[in-house]
Amino acid sequence: MANAQPLLSVRGVSKAFLGVSALENVDFTLQAGEVHALLGENGAGKSTLIKIITGAYRRDEGEVLLEGTPIHPRDVVDAQKLGIGTVYQEVNLLTNLTVAENLFLGRQPKRFGLTDVREMNRRSKAILDTYGLDIDVTAPLANFSVAIQQVVAIARAVDISGKVLVLDEPTASLDAHEVEMLFAVVRQLRARGMGIIFISHFLDQVYEIADSITVLRNGRLIDTVPVAGLDRLKLVSMMLGRQLEADIKRTIDPNTAQSEPLVSLRGLGKRGNIDPLDLDIRQGEVVGIAGLLGSGRTETAQLVFGIERADSGTISVAGTPVNMSSPRKAIAQGFAFCPEDRKTDGIVGDLSVRENIIFALQAQRGWMRPLSRSEQEALADRYIAALDIRTSDREKPIKFLSGGNQQKVLLARWLATNPRFLILDEPTRGIDVGAHAEIIRLIIDLCERGMALLVISSELGELVGYSSRIIVLRDRKMVSELTGDEISTDHIMKAIASHDATGEAA
Amino acid sequence: MKNSKYLPLMATFVVFVLAYIICISVFPNMLSTRVAGNLLTDNAFLGITAVGMTFVILSGGIDLSVGSVIAFTGVFLSVILRDTSIHPLAAFAIVLVLTTAFGAAMGGIIFFLDMPPFIVTLAGMFLARGISYLLTTESVPITHPFYSTLQDIYFLMPGGGRLTLIAIIMLVVFAVGIVLAQRTRFGTYVYALGGNLTSAQLMGVPVAKTTIGIYALSGFLAGLSGIVFSLYTSAGYSLAAVGVELDAIAAVVIGGTLLTGGYGFVAGTFLGICIQGLIQTYIVFDGTLSSWWTKIVIGLLLFGFIALQRGLMWMSERSARNMRHASAAQPSSA
């Protein structure tokens, strides 16, 4: 298949945001009649690459060739006209318009200067017939399930563009039957000779539908390989990055494993987010959560902290069941949570370092008992010194600090509330090497002082380094709990790569 | 489920029919083309501007400037007809160009400066009202003979009712509005903007052109409404039409258009106008009720319709959520 001219070819593309490189010298080749999976963890550069191909971003360097001709799409609409259509996970159609209007928006057939609704409906019906979809095209799109909306979105993209179809996590909210329906459509388009870029977190699906796989990590191309005969473990290690050095592990006090758990989860779960799981976290223990993006890691943390409400199971603190229906209640129990997306869920960019630090404590005390300015300053100074937060001034707006220092401020915010149980979601993402090491040292230090911690991280080596136990999530299920000598990057990757006996592929 | 789109419209229709039945059962005389003709004439200016408001609200925006623009139009016409020898038709053309450009400018500011329509059109409201004051603070009568000619044009309906020129203009505006909303690309784009701006953009809707077009249309219709209002009152007064923007919004919402945009019909707005007109007519017939009862009943109706819309949204959100949950339960291993 390689001797023909590739349908789409990306050569040496780089892209940086504010000096931070998001994509470095990446090559990507898509053949006609191929389903090509694009894999990588958060921040790997998948979405940046897709946005460059679909015209949402301009590349800094490199070239994109469509059927051998260099293209420079100005925007998404321009890329569509060139032949590159995209369907997103959150279906980007208009649910208040009819199916037919969605298919023909912007290119409605006209008669006497007015929209020819009858002709539009007739043609819509004909288009959807080719996908085996027999629905009322005059009904609002909102009446149909997400799967059907996806197919309508694909039909629109194919009808307008017709060469390259980008499917950005199209199956994330579909059930098994709907995924089959979608894949039937994808196979049909492949047979028609379209090139399809498929992005998904579900490895089983990648094995089922894709012909080849390109893996990105940290903005770099790792490899492009055919799916046939590809070992799952090898794929996972490509995605996560194999640690070459031997795992460095913290020595764990055997006594902690015997003590009473501080936090116990029993059958805690929420449909569509995470299947029910049991977990105990003791004082002086770091429990790590490993898994690929979309495996239910963050969802678990959100259930424990009361951001999402569980629909099954219980949470007990020190043996007493508690009602964890809101973050306020979690904080009242001495819980703390540093979220994954620091910028949108954590810091308040325009407020100063001091104000960001005192937030949680002030919220806990209530507005009736404000911290005095001198108390605030003392608190801020103490944590700036204790965590070595590099800022010229405690009154500096936090948005001017580096990622690592912002993360430390968030930690300081929660440490100021003197928590018993600290949840960290990707505490070391996007921060420099020096701050990285300091945050890991801090995690170990807090743990040794008797705090209970739950840490989510994609950095397996790091997780192995400080965790007393590690649970592995896959496809929104807990699949393994590793303790003692089982804790190693190898075991984690095997657990992630393992798949149910019912899975088809591989 | 398919009918959920039409449910608010049907609710409006039911309310209208019920209101009419109540009116007729109390005052049988209200069942006549005379009453109908008067109702249309009295509400012609409101109906015309409400059509513009329907487009604005369908797109997810709001236009608070229309009342002031109506007053400005009236003052401008009365002053120009008093002080110059320009023919009224030419004056109409000038004022329509002015108000359309005014609306287009507000649309441009809303889009290019990414400002909330509420604030931009609030500024427009003060601006238009202020300019009317600058022109004159008095009520200026319009005595041009052409005005009398226009005011005397009517179509005699069976039963003796008069369908005046301004009522006919309103009906034509509604008819054109319905076609524009349902059968043109512009109309679909308006619904698209109200449905989801990001999606609309990704699907290639010309957002800038459509936004400017919507507010220009609203400005044009406010100008036309001002012309009709000046024909109706034979005067221009800078304090006229205060709060008409709110009456227009009320008519649109009672007509079943969702205030958040994306759902609704121009025909619904016509029913909304008729309901408001019916209440006023009832109060006139009764003779003892304070005219403020109009506002009270409209207030209650508004509450009712907002509750109905909220309920419908809540129901559809819930069914969507259930659908997602049911489907997300087993995301893997086909």
Image (spheres, coloured by chain):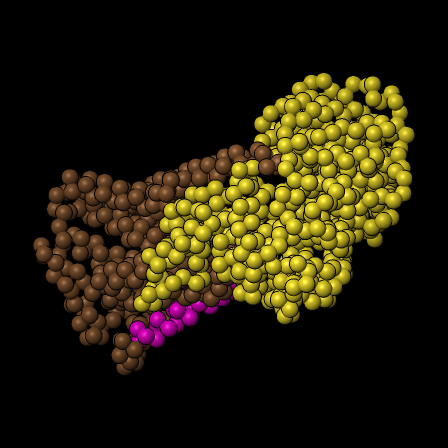
Chain colours: A yellow, B brown
**Residue B108 coordinates in the image, percent (x, y):** 49, 66
Question: Residue drawn at (16%, 39%), measured in percent from left and top?
Answer: B26
Q: What is the number of callouts on the image?
A: 0
> Relative to the observer, which residue lies in front, B178 or A392?
B178
Front-most of residues A491 and A462: A491
Asked whether residue A86 is in view, the answer is no
Which secondary structure class fits the magenta region best? helix
Query: Toward the viewer: A459 or A347?
Result: A459
Residue pictured at 77% horizontal, 49% vertical: A430
Q: Residue at x 82, y 37 (%)?
A: A489
Work out whether residue B285 can be spotted.
yes
Side of A59 where A380 appears, left or right: right
Q: Magenta segment: does it hold A80?
A: no
User: Which quadrant is the C terminus of chain B positioned in?
Assistant: top right
Q: In which quarter of the view is residue A208 placed?
A: top right
What is the magenta range? B91-117
| Foreground pick, A244 / B101 | A244
| x and y percentages locating residue B178 in the rendered image | 31, 58
